Image (tube, rainbow, N blue to C red):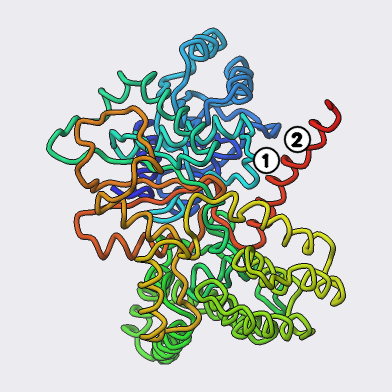
Amino acid sequence: MNVIQAVKMYITKMTEESGPGMKVILMDRETTSIVSMVFSQSEILQKEVYLFERIDSHSKWDNLKHMKCIAFLRPTSENIALLSRELRYPKYGVYFIYFSNVISKADVKTLAECDEQEAVREVQEVFADYLAVDRHLFSFNITGCLRGRMWNQQELQRCSQGLLALLLSLKRRAVVRYEAASEPCARLAERVRDLLRREAVLIDNNIPFNGDIPTPQLLIIDRRDDPVTPLLNQWTYQAMVHELLTIHNNRVSLAHVADVPADFREVVLASEQDEFYAKNLYSNFGEIGQTMKSLMDEFQKKAKSHQKVESISDMKNFVETYPLFKKMSGTVTKHVTVVGELSAAVATHHLLEVSELEQEIACQSDHSKHLQRLKSLISNESIRHHDAAKLVALYALRYEKHASNALPALTDALKSRGCPEPLVKAVVNVLEYGGAHARQSDLFGLQDAAKITKRLFKGLNGVENIYTQHTPLLKDTLEDLIKGKLRENLYPTLGGDDSGYGRRPQDIIVFIVGGATYEEALCVHQINQAYPGVKVVLGGTTVHNSTSFLEEVKAAMQGVHRTHTRHIKNV
């Protein structure tokens, strides 16, 4: 079962258990996102859910006692207080209450005491406590989870509870491994281990024990280990849309596009609801152009056949096929608009030139050549400040220890071209966040003989596509784990059921503290295809593009600077 199927199964169960009749679904901010990621509004309507309400809204409705209320909420103290108030003065006839995670007995008792009118029919725990972004990708929508190297406690709790829910929903008894050099990874691993121990009975009741297969592994790693991947321009459809237009909860705003039809000011890009998108998530930009042409040709053929309505049977045929035609028309308009915007951005901002240099800095070492080309691009006014700053950040990471490092001159060049101060500061922040001192890994393959050889062969053979030659560090980490070569001293194991440990894992959940990327989601998709029998699911505190990654870095570095200031004051 994939993550989308797991969440869908829980939501379907909620709508079915309440029986036939008109229903309202009562949600909080997070559960609204969880539901909207996997179901369209029309799909929910088919389940007799006619009203969507937020528990924190104070809308005044008249008598709605004829409606059944499905409450789907996170078990937070705020939600318990709001639900208690709702149950004291119930608006709806009956209530079926579902919490997205484990709820304490004390909270259940509080709710029971408020239910004086005995309107509650059901209180259950379902484990849909994460955003199912794609079949093998989940997120908690948290940007800036760390302050320095310390967790925000609320977000540490959110991530540990979410990972517990994920394991319960996918029915996996996992051992927890984490990146040894990362304090935040160690803290999260300990918190998850403690939850797994505390909820041992729940796990025994929900997850069948299978000693015949290797124990699944939950691997917790740190974004700092690979600060390069989120800085790169992308050339596969999904990743490119996120980098240039931003995908938020499967929605993309096109409000800024001139003459865009009102229906398309915000579009939904969800593989479960859009066949074209599902087929082309990982197609590169060149292929998308060809596929769009085929889609347009097919649409024009259908449009011509619809123009010919002469007989009664033609009319009947038109009426029967019109909904499909209308849906296809919407798909064509949506993707033509999105691809048009991507094409315009690529041309206007010279992204092919920018990306070529990004890829070269990420994958090869040639200081004088890279420095010369970088200076030339910085002086080109058509290049966005954002791209110029990203290129300098990549240079800073690659040539941090180089004898001729020219970072001060490059940051001066950014200032001279009028680059905003926060972007200039972002370059320094990235180096502080993910420089050599902060990484456990050999990111650029400078020490590992096998990696150096691999890189040389790649260079001799040439690359299939200069814009996609980079592979995320995650690929090496996962391949080592699948082959049983991931070193225990670098990625130690914590608790859980380890009877099958030591054998090569077939089920892997990898979670990136500090956020994952769509390039890494593509890498996981490729690994799932390349290793039959192995299933990898990727998660992150959020799913980054380069803009949100720089926000992540800024939040973490503000924590570091505050800590330094506090120490100075104490001295």
Q: At 61% across and 14% down in the image, what residue appears?
A: 88
Quarter assignment of residue 556: top right
Q: At 76% across and 85% down in the image, what residue appears?
A: 382
Q: Is residue 319 above or below residue 431?
A: below
Mark yes or no: residue 309 visible.
Answer: no
Q: Quadrant of the C terminus?
A: top right
Q: Is residue 193 above or below residue 507?
A: above
Question: Marks 1 and 2: in contact by CB < 8 Å?
Answer: yes
Q: Which residue is mark 1?
A: 148
**Identity, as a three-letter code, of the amino acid under mark 2:** Thr
Q: Is residue 135 above or below residue 327?
A: above
**Which residue is nearer to you in this view: 56 or 49?**
56
Q: Residue 386: x, y in percent?
A: 72, 70
Mark 1 surroundings: few (<14), some (14-19) or many (≥20) residues within 10 A: many
Total tally of numbered discs in the picture: 2
Of marks 2 and 1, which one's residue comes earlier in the chain? 1
Q: Residue 542: x, y in percent?
A: 55, 49
State the SS at label 2: helix
Q: Residue furthest front?
A: 403
State the SS at label 1: loop
Q: Residue 108: x, y in percent?
A: 48, 14
**Identity, as a three-letter code, of the amino acid under mark 1:** Gly
Marks 2 and 1 sit apart, C-alpha to C-alpha, by: 8 Å
**Which residue is nearer to you in this view: 291 or 506?**
506
Q: Which mark is residue 563?
A: 2
Residue 391 horizontal side relative to residue 561, left or right: left
